[in-house]
Image (cartoon, rainbow, N blue to C red):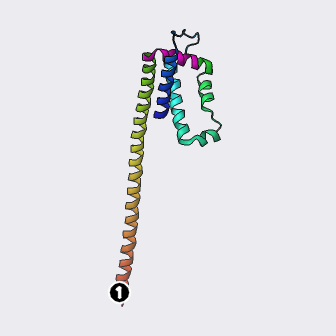
């Protein structure tokens, strides 16, 4: 995910350096809020591609097409909006910072959930061990009693 972020920042810088004049505001400019949502999804999908590209391919998911369809936009609209926001680096920085904050918040939530699940699994294993130990103790007691009974008979 860091790699994608670095590439995105580099792209923004290159685009910003190559634009001499202030870009015109596109007629179909994507709102800041929607742009945040799109970039968030792009980051998540790119991270997923890095983790398990084959799973996405096997399910027929083409990330770029998925994003464009989900937000009902086309690639030109996204490119024009991205270029426009990239020119205004403070605005684009705000968008990226909001996306980053959302990702970090969600990561914390997942880590907390993971800890809760691990603790529940540990409690379950511990209780199963206790049950098994009680069964072993019961079996040992029964065997001991039988030995004592058979010793009394002799």
Q: Is residue 1 visible?
A: no
Q: Position of residue 47 (x, y in %)?
A: 51, 36
Relative placement, left or right, of 67 versus 121 is right
The correct choice, above or below, for 80 with respect to 70 in the image is above
Q: Residue visible at 40% across and 40% down?
A: 111
- Identify the element where label 1 is drawn: helix
Judge by depth and name the residue closer to the eye, 2 or 58: 2
> Relative to residue 142, is residue 61 drawn left or right?
right
Magenta residues (range): 78-89
Task: Classify 53 as above or below 130.
Answer: above
Q: Main secondary structure of the magenta part?
A: helix
Q: Position of residue 115 (x, y in %)?
A: 39, 44
Q: Residue at x 65, y 37 (%)?
A: 60
Q: Which residue is mark 1?
A: 151
Q: Quadrant of residue 57?
A: top right
Asked whether 102 falls inside the magenta stretch, the response is: no
Q: Is residue 28 above or below residue 42?
A: above
Q: Residue at x 53, y 41 (%)?
A: 51
Where residue 104 sits, quadrant-wise, is top left
């Amino acid at each position: 995910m860091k790699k994608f972020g670095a590439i995105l920042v580099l792209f923004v810088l290159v685009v910003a350096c190559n634009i001499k004049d202030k870009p015109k505001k596109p007629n179909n400019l994507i709102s800041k809020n929607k742009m945040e949502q799109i970039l968030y999804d792009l980051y998540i999908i790119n991270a997923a591609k890095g983790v398990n590209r084959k799973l996405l391919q096997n399910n027929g998911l083409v990330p770029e097409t998925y994003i464009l369809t989900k937000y009902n936009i086309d690639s030109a609209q996204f490119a024009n909006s991205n270029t426009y926001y990239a020119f205004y680096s403070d605005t684009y920085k705000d968008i990226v910072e909001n996306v980053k904050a959302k990702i970090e918040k969600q990561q914390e939530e997942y880590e907390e959930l993971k800890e809760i699940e691990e603790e529940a699994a540990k409690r379950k294993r511990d209780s199963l061990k206790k049950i098994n130990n009680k069964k072993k103790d019961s079996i040992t007691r029964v065997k001991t009693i039988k030995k004592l009974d058979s010793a009394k008979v002799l």
